[in-house]
Amino acid sequence: METTETRNGHHWSQTLLGVGLIIMFAYYGESVLAVLFFAILLTFMLSPVVQALEYVHLPRAMAALISVVALLAVLYGVTVASYNQALTFADNLPKYSQKIRSMLQPYQQQAERLEKTGDVVGPEDKNIVPVRQVQSWSEALTHGAGTVTDIALALSFVPFLAYFLLTWQSHARSATVMLFPLEHRNTAFVTLGLIGKMLQSFIVGNLLIGLLISAVSVGIFGLLHVPFFYFVGFLSGFLSLVPYLGIVLAMVPPILVGLGQLEPGDLVVVAVCVVGMHLLALNVLYPKLLGSRLKINPLAVTIALLFWGAVWGAVGLVLAIPITGALKIICDHVESMKPWADWLGE
């Protein structure tokens, strides 16, 4: 006769097996899943626009087409403007690099002297144990990226998927609910609705916060005469949205172009402004726009970033928080998984 301990052992072994299969599927299915997730995020971002166009009696298919085409036109315009600014910036980059090297040269010479004086092991020492080379951050973040052709081909599917998801949104949601047993369909319907609202709040909230920080950054950098302040301001504003690393990444563009061009006091003002705007977004804007939908504790966010960053590289860092938020909502509405929801929650 099967005991309780035996049943618990079978339960945990099946759970671990299921988790392992999901991780394997996520790892090897990155190219398909990442495109699908980006299309889903784009769908929830455009959904309010489609609803507004439907309000003026446009067919849903036409409203979805207009929304996707308009977004592509905006992205094209932003890309062209950013590309021209980036080319100008790249032309001047050797000048900035030379100034940075001249500023760092004394420290480099001092480090070389320390290295020479501290070299106590001969180059031909037979007892040296070879150490495996650690994977660099650039290799980790570009994991699965493939060639430019592969990336362009994958991205070309996103607008088409978004269009069909927008067109068949109600049908897809109803059909998904019908996959569940009758007694669980209401829970599935509510869960899908909450996930949709969370994703919509996440996308729209991040977009509004990024635009606000970028606009303020452009204004401040323009007053301080930071070179390429239009390009650098928007780049710094949206880099500030990166979880945990944003405060550092947002400082890099204005400090890089400001070295040798701005006074030390102006560089300090730039750094203080970047830190201030990041803290404002983190402590005021995020709780107001996302706090009611996305309640995940910082430890869970950190683990999610580490996990999805290791599995999908840079794409995983972008998708880690919405995926974790969706998992928490699912755990909230499944009785056996509510302890996991409590662990993920604030």
Image (cartoon, rainbow, N blue to C red):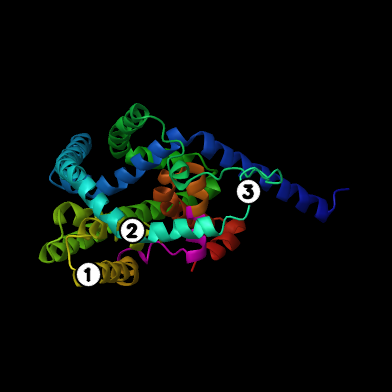
- For the residue carrying disc 3, how many other residues have a C-alpha within 10 Å: few (<14), some (14-19), or many (20+)? few
Q: Which of 204 and 247 is in front in this view?
A: 247
Q: Earlier in the sequence, mark 1 or mark 2?
A: 2
Asked whether residue 325 is in view, the answer is: yes
Element type at marker 1? helix
Disc 1 from disc 2: Cα separation: 16 Å
Please give the label number shown on residue 264: 1
Q: Where is residue 85 in the image (x, y as percent from the top left)?
A: 15, 45
Asked whether residue 240 is in view, the answer is: no
> Is residue 305 shown left or right of residue 216?
right
Report the amino acid beneath label 1.
Pro
Q: Number of numbered discs present?
A: 3
> Is residue 50 shown left or right of residue 119?
left
Query: In this figure, which residue is indicated by the disc labeled 3?
Result: 122
- Residue range of the region highlighted in magenta in the rendering: 289-305
Where residue 205 sits, quadrant-wise, is bottom left
Q: Does the magenta stretch include residue 126?
A: no
The residue under the point 57% across, 41% down is 22
Q: Nearer the viewer, residue 328 or 51?
A: 328
The residue under the point 45% across, 53% down is 326
Nearer the observer: mark 3 or 2; the answer is 3
Report the amino acid beneath label 2.
Leu
Query: In this figure, which residue is indicated by the disc labeled 2?
Result: 104
- For the residue carrying disc 2, how many other residues have a C-alpha within 10 Å: few (<14), some (14-19), or many (20+)? few
